[in-house]
Image (cartoon, coloured by chain):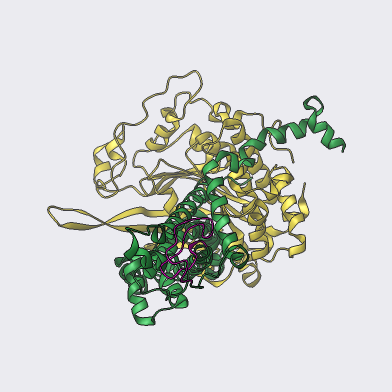
Chain colours: A green, B yellow
Amino acid sequence: MAVGEASLDPSTVPAGKAAARAKKPRRKSLFLRRPFFSLALLVALGFVLCAVFAPFIAPYDPTAQSIEAMMAPPGPDHLLGTDSFGKDILSRIIFGARYALTIGIVAVLIGAGGGLVLGLAAGLSTGWLEWALMRLIDSILALPSLILAIAIIAILGQGVDKVILAVGISLVGPFSRTVRSDVLQVKTQLFIEAAHLMSIPRLTVIRRHILPNVFFPLLVQITVRISEAILVSSSLSFLGIGVTPPTPDWGLMIAEGRGFVSFAPWMSGMPGMALAILLVALAIVGDAVREEFDPKLKRAQ
Amino acid sequence: MTEPLLGDAVPAAAPGAGSNGIAASDRPVFELLDVEKRFAVSRPAGFLKREKRSLAALDGVRLTVRRGASIALVGESGSGKSTLLRVLLGLAEPSDGKALYFGQPVNEVRAQSRDFARSVAMIYQDARASLDPRMTVTALIAEPLLHFGLCGREAVGERVAALLSRVGLPAEIAERYPAALSGGQVRRVAIARALAAEPTVLIADEAVSGLDVSTQAQLLNLLRRLKREMGLTLLFITHDLGVASYLCEEIAIMYLGRIVETGPTDAVLSAPAHPYSRALRHAAPEFFAPITDPLEGEIPSPLDLPTGCRFASRCPRVEEDCLTAEPILAPIAPGRTVACRHPLDAEDHPALPQITASAPAAGSPAGGAGVSA
């Protein structure tokens, strides 16, 4: 109580508090400093909420067909219209957020996990093993993620789990490359030599000094690459080789509406817009996270 | 004095002391016997051709570091100081010659046990880079404590606090990261970390360069106090002669991968015997005196060493026999050696001002405004 009163009146603020307050504006107002980030974060969280509470939010069953309401334009009954089978597009977009986010996040985690292992191995090994690992990474990287994902789908077959795996594997290349370059950069640092000088065992050095210094840039990469994973998975569905109908997947919905674009543009347009908004929001969040937590810019308190 | 913290470490950590008895304790801590370190370099030799050459970073270096000694290693950039250090620490293997630690090759001693790593501590020139940026000060100082089993986890906080106060740092920085510390504080953390292992030998590479004068003075006072209290053997790499004379009883001057002069710091600095030492001595700025042009020409490339004395191309006193064969390090007075055919003697030194009086680091309030214990 006393503290609360004192801090309201500037003249009675104790010296220590005043100093603490003088420092505060630099650290506190992340949301005020980055208005776009705040907006994008709200949008992204909105999609997450939709995904989690889809059954409670969606006005209709996303797979229920209706002959009366076929290709209805956006209106009071169906806010975003219906598709050629009369399925409610808003409900399908809401349920589709589940697939988009689940596939995006799980695939990125698979890619990051694989990339961490491969990148660490490539960055820490020497001689022929390093050569072999680097050629492996190069050959993964030589193919664009989408092409690689298509190739993996061709082997594994279709389905949500296969899409997640395919997209995840297609991301291992980029992840392992960044992990490897971080490892190479960290392992030449003086504090690694200092640890070596102290006769600290190699594995301990990796665990204690190299991994933590590689892990934070990796977290940033993860946030940045979720949108890429969602885009690739949607592209797979759009091409008809990803998730199978009647799953409410955005890419699939865009593909289904393609033939009706001239007289029912909302069929492709609405899920396309949802995809675009989510990707832009995630990209802005990812960039902000990268700028805020870049290890080179980081100033711990 | 915080005697219990590190006081008993001096005799205990010398390997071989138990098995060899008195003989081992008489042995020098470090002994470099004609150490050479060559690096293979390739450079362009015409179109699409490269020529393989070997570059001698160290060339026949002899150096003895006795227990309790304090030696300054002085020389300009590229003279091989850092390579010498790496050989001494066992990070680089000499191409030829021997680097001995209590009579045993450094590489073997390092491989055998952690004793060497514990007894020989290093303070890097770039202290900030030598500390893991993802670790707090406590974690950084606790690492050697736990690694060498010097205390249990429950006692770490106490030991870290004791070490911090020993190097004059406030206890509240314990939970900070290096990025939040000033240059002087980072050096102190590096020193505290080095001392945590309870070493008997402290090797410091330019440990005070690049700091403002008052911080330098505080750190020098701190190091001098630690040396005195803990009986540390000190090897201090510097190019500041004032620092050398303040902290070290002996000095070794390097030029192009060779030691050209050794001896007691005061004697060498007041009457240098090697023309290069004299040039260095004159290059040290004095108050109220114009800075003389120290040396003509550049340091020769170690790839194209001149035959004969490697200093001949820049030496003001060069004579014909200097160009034929390389002079070896030979004694000229008790405790002094020089690698020169025509060493300078006392008459060659008209009124050199006392370097200890003028060097800013040493001249600053010794102990007064310095580190509070």
Q: Which of B219 and A187 is in front in this view?
A: A187
Q: Nearer the viewer, residue B264 or A281?
A: A281
A124 relative to B151 in the view: left or right: left
Question: Looking at the rendering, which quadrant does residue B346 occupy?
Answer: top left
Q: Does the magenta stretch include residue A89?
A: yes
Question: Looking at the rendering, which quadrant does residue A276 occupy?
Answer: bottom left
Magenta segment, prevailing SS (helix, strand or loop): loop
Residue at left offset 63%, top offset 72%:
B19
Camera sees residue A211 = yes
Q: Point out residue A176 in the picture as x, y percentages from the top left corner.
A: 42, 66
Q: Which of A47 and A40 is in front in this view?
A: A47
Q: Nearer the viewer, residue B317 or A190?
A: A190
- The answer to whether A154 is drawn above or below residue B169 in the figure is below
Residue at left offset 60%, top offset 47%:
B178
B164 relative to A119 in the view: left or right: right
Q: Point out residue B131 in the picture as x, y percentages from the top left corner.
A: 56, 52
Q: Point out residue B216 in the picture as x, y percentages from the top left corner.
A: 59, 35
